[in-house]
Image: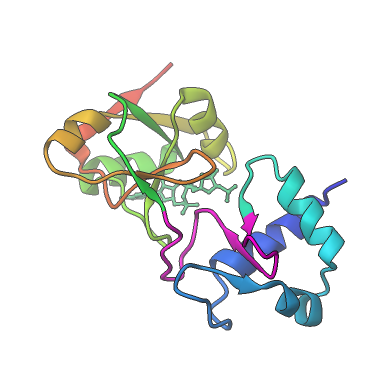
Amino acid sequence: MCNINREQKLAYLLRHDKQYNFDIHGWREVHDLVENHGYTQEELASIVKNSNKQRFEFSDDGLLIRARQGHSIQVDVALTEATPPEYLYHGTVVSNVASIMEKGLLPMNRLYVHLSVDESTALKVGSRRKGGAVVLKVAARRMWEAGHRFWFSRNGVWLTKTVPADYLIIDDK
Ligand code: HQG
């Protein structure tokens, strides 16, 4: 069984912890999490295996662990650059929409804007926050054709640096 709070704490420790000196590829020593943050090897293995979004991975030798995406710290987690499908989706809340339609989608505290391959996933992302969820449709292929770069993480999240408002369509289903 995977305790969601322990997983969330791990997500923080692997994506946002400015106190730790991460390797440039985002790896943190398993030993550090065991010694200083109260995890056991078994608990970490269980979280990595059972994370519903497959957020984390171990190095081949099992000594290091990292998040696959979602960082605010500057790391290069070997994302795959790729040509996006015609449309990708971004889940947000009503109160952000006016600002987004003015300034475009910005990465805010993270390194990238996060996009989903389908509307239902984006709706779940938007529903994490209070306020009505809104799904924005992103004309991703048109952006790519205009020179914007896209990557995807090993757990299937699409990433780009910013999405100018011209490429956004409000899906009010
Ligand atoms: C919004 C979770 C106003 C943006 C999820 C979002 C995702 C703007 C918030 C992943 C804006 C940033 C990322 C603008 C963007 N004006 N608001 N110009 N541009 N925003 O958490 O995409 O469970 O950094 O719409 O499932 O919500 O952690 O990004 O509401 O995949 O693995 O600013 O985090 O994955 O919020 O979520 P976030 P996000 P995990």
Could you tell me which quadrant the N terminus lies in? top right
Query: Magenta span: helix, strand or loop, mainly?
Result: loop
Could you tell me which quadrant the C terminus lies in? top left
Q: Is residue 145 above or below residue 61?
A: above
Left or right, 73 with reference to 163: right
Query: Residue at image x 76%, y 52%?
Result: 47
Query: Residue at image x 69%, y 63%?
Result: 10
**Residue farthest to the left, as pictured:** 146
Coloration mode:
rainbow
**Residue farthest to the front, as pictured:** 61
* Residue 94 on image: x %, y %: 43, 37
Q: Is residue 167 above or below residue 51?
A: above
Give yes or no for residue 136 being in the magenta stretch: no
Query: Residue at image x 83%, y 52%?
Result: 3
Left or right, 38 with reference to 95: right
**Residue farthest to the top, as pictured:** 173
Q: How many marks?
A: 0
* Residue 27 on image: x %, y %: 56, 69
Q: Quadrant of residue 111?
A: bottom left
> Which of 11/50 is in front?
50
Q: Look at the image and give the residue range highlighted in magenta.
A: 57-78
> Which of 113/67 is in front?
67
* Residue 57 on image: x %, y %: 63, 55
Q: Is residue 54 above or below residue 34?
A: above
Left or right, 130 with reference to 83: right
* Residue 45 on image: x %, y %: 78, 56
> Which of 90/45 is in front?
45
